[in-house]
């Protein structure tokens, strides 16, 4: 009788393992009511997309043209004669304006620094 009870309990456990619920029974007695445990469905962990960062943009540097102020000069000349009388001559003011002119590149080019066991070299990249 004991063997029949053990086989009955084992068959209940084997059959219950195939479903969503598991039945537990005591192997020593056939009078214990079966206990069930339901398994909750697994939920996937939330995924977070990696943030995207736009590449920084660099505006080209602008260089304002240099300005030169106009120069104005008035010339006054005083002549003294041998008799002691003086004569003053004034020349009208002349205004000279020079336009700023830039020639050549605005950059001195890339610079590099190279260290060597015997010293260092600093200058234009070759």
Image (cartoon, rainbow, N blue to C red):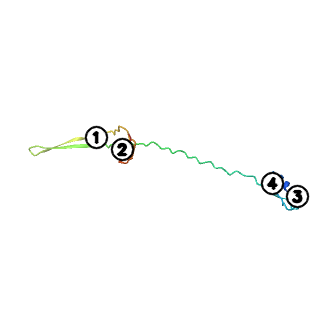
Circle 4 is placed at which residue position? 21
Q: Earlier in the sequence, mark 1 or mark 3?
A: 3
Q: Circle 3 is placed at which residue position?
A: 3
User: Which circle, 1 or 4, is nearer the viewer?
Assistant: 4
Q: Nearer the viewer, mark 3 or mark 2?
A: 3
Other-residue count near label 3 (Cα within 10 Å), few / some / many at <14 / 14–19 / ≥20: few
Q: Earlier in the sequence, mark 2 or mark 4?
A: 4
Task: Identify the secondary structure beneath mark 3.
Answer: helix
Within-10-Å neighbours for mark 2: few <14, some 14–19, many 20+ = few
Along the viewing direction, whichever of 36 and 67 lies nearer the viewer: 36
For marks 1 and 2, the one nearer the N-term is 1
- In front of the other: 115 or 124: 115
Q: In the image, which is nearer the foreground, mark 1 or mark 3?
A: 3
- According to the picture, the residue beneath numbered tag 1 turns out to be 95
Q: Is there a contact, CB below 8 Å, between mark 1 and mark 4? A: no
In three-dimensional space, the C-alpha distance between marks 4 and 3, rounded to whole angstroms, equals 26 Å
Q: Secondary structure at mark 4?
A: strand
Q: Nearer the viewer, mark 1 or mark 2?
A: 2
């Amino acid at each position: 009788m004991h063997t029949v009870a053990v086989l009955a309990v084992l068959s209940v456990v084997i059959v219950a393992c195939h479903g969503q619920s598991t039945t537990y029974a005591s192997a020593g007695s056939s009078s214990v009511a079966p206990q069930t445990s339901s398994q909750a469905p697994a939920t996937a962990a939330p995924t977070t997309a990696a943030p995207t960062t736009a590449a920084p943009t660099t505006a080209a540097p602008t260089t304002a043209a240099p300005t030169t102020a106009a120069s104005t000069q008035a010339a006054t000349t005083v002549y003294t004669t041998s008799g002691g009388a003086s004569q003053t001559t004034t020349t009208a003011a002349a205004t000279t304006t020079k336009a700023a002119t830039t020639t050549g590149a605005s950059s001195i080019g890339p610079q590099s620094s190279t260290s060597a066991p015997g010293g260092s070299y600093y200058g234009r990249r070759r």
